[in-house]
Amino acid sequence: MSLEGRAIIEHVTTVVIGAGHAGLAASHFLGERSIDHLVIERGEVANSWRRERWDSFRLLTPNWQSRLPSLAYEGPDPDGYMTTKEVTQFIEGFAALSRAPVRTGTNVTSVRAAGGGYRVTTSRGEIACRAVVIASGACNRPVVPPFSDAVPPSVEQLTPFDYREPGRLPDGGVLVVGASATGVQLAAELRRSGRPVVLSVGEHVRLPRTYRGRDVLWWMDTSGVWDQRYDEIDDLTRARRLPSPQLVGTPERQTLDLNALTSMGVELVGRWATVRDGRALFSGGLRNVFSLADLKMERLLDTFDAWARIRDLEICPPERFAPTRVPESARLQLDLRSGEIRTIVWATGFRPDYGWLDVPVVDEKGRLRHDGGVVTDSPGLYALGLPVLRRRRSTFIHGIEADAREVIDHLAGYLAVRR
């Protein structure tokens, strides 16, 4: 029988795909507007936090920034950083508080336009709806370069989804590829375990953990840097692709930049360019890469200082940090057949998975085409939880409230016009 001939199991006005913080925020505002809806989740509430983080993972943002609509952190350690278990419990609490209509254990296999709205095919039947909110996340699949196929089979390859803790890796050296938050955290943890670690460094965002006595993310929040809207950013495509800043959440509020890693004994090499005859080949130019990251950090700190000066804040004086130290002779190649490296961890980013989206709204690089979360090529289709969706803070948990409110406002207007 054709798809059109099948009985429709359910009709609902809006389907939200994903029961993480973004999907639940959408549900909150849909509920406030009395728009009937259903939240579809492939696993459990906060599934990615439960299943796709390593054991020692903590949020980059301090606890006082952990907030969702009508829910904020009220624990004893506002300056601490949530573990994965704590994040999961926080999001579960939000789901219960908002009474979100979540259907767990349900895979979405297709979303396609039908009858002036959409038909959502799931592992538990089909749903006809007028609008869809895609809140399935930006980090569904790790990005691994094609040349990984040329790595000798004697070297084990992992992504952050596979990694849990150092003891589960083969004995010997580890090559960590990527110097964003994930890369520097895993390099540090592996080095502390006693392993030799090589870190392949490309473009990165350097930040101190604290600045002038406050968490650096306090400055981002309070100074308004994070409030910059997507339609005010000169190069939005680039902003949305920037790696996460080199931060780690620890009780000591430590800075974890490349200088800290080299002091621990981590060896730095350039961006991994390719594999040839069993050898990893790295680009040169580390000095330029480091200088650019240092320059951008200094400019951001200048912005903070100017903001504090205008307000005449009584706060610690301005600080400046030593330039990133350039290795005297960074290796340009590494023989992967020698046994020096037994494991490669690809901390080279993530991408969303839209393989189930049967609507022509994804570009050639697999990115959803949208305008601030509104998929203009397919009316009634929306997105939440993507980097710099509507503001620079969109990526973070505390950034979802304003985004969700505005996206659901647009959705409600769309539904009202099409009644």
Image (cartoon, rainbow, N blue to C red):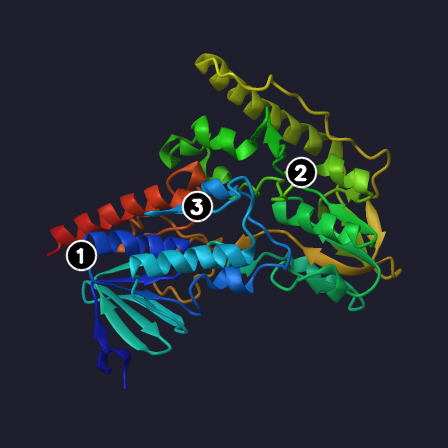
Residue at 38% from the left image edge and 46% from the top image edge: 400
User: Nearer the viewer's eye, disc 3 or disc 1?
Assistant: 3
Residue at 29% from the left image edge and 61% from the top image edge: 99
Q: Where is residue 268 in the image (x, y as percent from the top left)?
A: 78, 42
Q: Which mark is residue 34?
A: 1
1 relative position to 269: left or right: left
Which residue occupies the extreme bottom position in the image?
1
Q: How far is disc 3 from disc 2 in space, using C-alphas?
A: 23 Å
Residue at 69% from the left image edge and 28% from the top image edge: 291
374 relative position to 48: left or right: left
Mark 3: amino acid:
Glu
Mark 1: amino acid:
Ser
Q: How far is disc 3 from disc 1 in space, using C-alphas?
A: 29 Å
User: Nearer the viewer's eye, disc 2 or disc 1?
Assistant: 2
Q: Where is residue 83 in the image (x, y as percent from the top left)?
A: 56, 53
**Does residue 178 appear in this view?**
no
Earlier along the polypeptide chain: callout 2 or callout 1?
1
Quadrant housing residue 243: top right
Q: Nearer the viewer, residue 199 or 256?
A: 256
Q: Which mark is residue 254?
A: 2
